[in-house]
Image: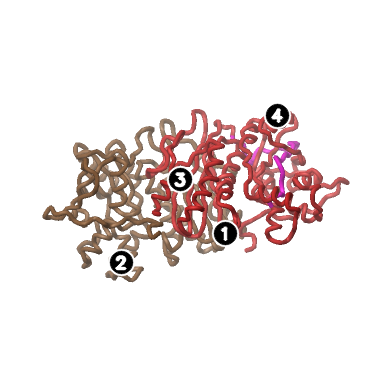
Chain colours: A brown, B red
Amino acid sequence: MGEFDLIDRFFKRPAKHADLGVGDDCALLSPRPGHQLALSADMLVEGRHFLSTVDPATLGHKSLAVNLSDLAACGAEPRAFLLSLSLPRADVAWLQGFSQGLFALADAHGCELIGGDTTQGPLNISITVLGDVPRGQALLRSGARAGDDIFVSGTVGDARLALEVFRGKLSLPETVFRRCRNRMEQPTPRVALGIGLRGVASAAADISDGLLGDLGHILRQSGAGARLDLAACEGLLSCRHDVPLTDAWLRTCVLSGGDDYELVFTAPPTLRDAVQQAAIDSQTSVTCIGTVTATTGIDLLDRQGHRVDTSFTSFDHFAQE
Amino acid sequence: MGEFDLIDRFFKRPAKHADLGVGDDCALLSPRPGHQLALSADMLVEGRHFLSTVDPATLGHKSLAVNLSDLAACGAEPRAFLLSLSLPRADVAWLQGFSQGLFALADAHGCELIGGDTTQGPLNISITVLGDVPRGQALLRSGARAGDDIFVSGTVGDARLALEVFRGKLSLPETVFRRCRNRMEQPTPRVALGIGLRGVASAAADISDGLLGDLGHILRQSGAGARLDLAACEGLLSCRHDVPLTDAWLRTCVLSGGDDYELVFTAPPTLRDAVQQAAIDSQTSVTCIGTVTATTGIDLLDRQGHRVDTSFTSFDHFAQE
């Protein structure tokens, strides 16, 4: 199978919303009137972002999900994406699975493939995603203010827990493991919540590298700090009460585990009802875990109000060097 | 050096034209009023698109050049790009060279880096580029009509010639090799010519996989064929008269050599003066190599008007399978 056959067979679908889709030197796209385009890119590499044993459909899902998660974090509505794919070989079964998982998620969000590239090489999946956001309404990392509540969507830490099982560091009951593995392999981008938080959240980011690390981006870019409730954070782990975990594992998974693709966001206390309404409308649970402070740094407090060590690092691809 | 330090040090520069640049979950961009966004993505893999010995500054240039070439092919003006980079390690000297070569070309075209991703893995450079084009004026592959002239910009085949020297299949005088190598490693995207051809060219594509292959895309998407003048095609090789080449090598390089990043385009004979004016304004040579025909397929004719075999294949990343 040649490169163009491969594209025709698995990736060429007529553009429904873009002005021009796959098949020319460029695609053509216009934001809707009164909107800006929001853009983000993520690259997934075997052994680093996914295991070689992963089901290709699951991988197709995750490749787009991590990109849609960035759109969610800025409150944008998905429009289109470009896929650049480096493959060791043109494996039909793999391509069928991958494209099926990819397009199932894309279709669910009305996000169409409008371009990209395919080449031979070590497996690498590089996606650029584009969304629309009403001009001036994008959620940024820089808008958090002292006194704002800090919220997290869904559950956090499960993906890391599954990874540690794969690494042989932990073991989990089969049903719990399956749930955690599903969170790691098929994350749910919080697109509807992000859109619902326009005009409500003062700042937002998605949790890809770990809760403390990604909240840290918001705080740094807002020139602020945070006081966090450790018990509330620990409660973010879905299997908190199903498995016995040491405090160290629990905190590592929840505070510095990556790959969750939930949203961490801030909002003024006057808008608590609006936050709850956005959660209900998007059928996404939302947990308040603390407060933005004027002084920089993160204070993590246990039930007794004592400070807990937060020298967990968030995931960094070059941290070992 | 960590991932975020690496981004800050080499790739984070303030956005001048985009609404929001590097540093948040998404960048924000708007086309200028009355314009559409043109988008394209290209992925470069070591050993396939460049040699491991290549100078990193040269590679930075080429990585963006091949993307700008796609914008040129549709007559779009460069605006911004996203860079996803997989690196075996955070090598400062390499990053300095790469980013310097990349930004030199980006600045020359007013095309700013607004986002992307960095990760550890086999060397892979994935860029998505965005440009502006007045609504409805993009050059497409599908507009060629029987009777149109077929033009090619600049010189073609030099990059392939250099590659064959690296492969040990050919040898060239040092000065000729240097010129050919420069064409292979530092191609010039024909952005100004592409913009000048708006309203003039009936169809266009850039020559990345080989002249016959890329012209073939235009013809297929236009439902047309072509009659080409072999002598005019052979004249596209810059060192045509400087080195003794067999007919087979000459034709292979010119007709099916990739990596030239020139434009092949069609225009009605009534617009010949406008084509010449666009060439002069953009300081780019343009050569007429034939005519679009109503019957499909490509006829390549020698000086005596005899048909020449065109069973050259254009480059295909998965053709061997």
Q: Residue at the spot x=77%, y=52% of the render?
A: B251
Tell which subunit mark 2 falls on: A
Q: Are marks 4 and 1 in contact (CB under 8 Å)?
A: no
* Residue A205 visible: yes
Q: Residues within 10 Å of mark 2 (few under 14, many from 20)?
A: many
* Dots 4 and 2 on the same chain: no
Residue B11's tag is 3
Distance of mark 4 from mark 3, alpha carbons? 38 Å
Residue underneath mark 1: A120
Range drawn in magenta: B138-159
Distance of mark 2 from mark 3, alpha carbons? 39 Å
Quadrant location of the N terminus of chain B?
A: bottom left
- Name the residue type under label 4: Gln
Tell which subunit mark 1 falls on: A
Distance of mark 4 from mark 2, alpha carbons? 67 Å
Image coords of residue B15 (percent x, y):
44, 37
Residue A177's tag is 2
Tell which subunit mark 3 falls on: B
Disc 2, SS: helix
- Name the residue type under label 1: Gln
To which quarter of the image does residue A164 belong? bottom left
Residue underneath mark 4: B277
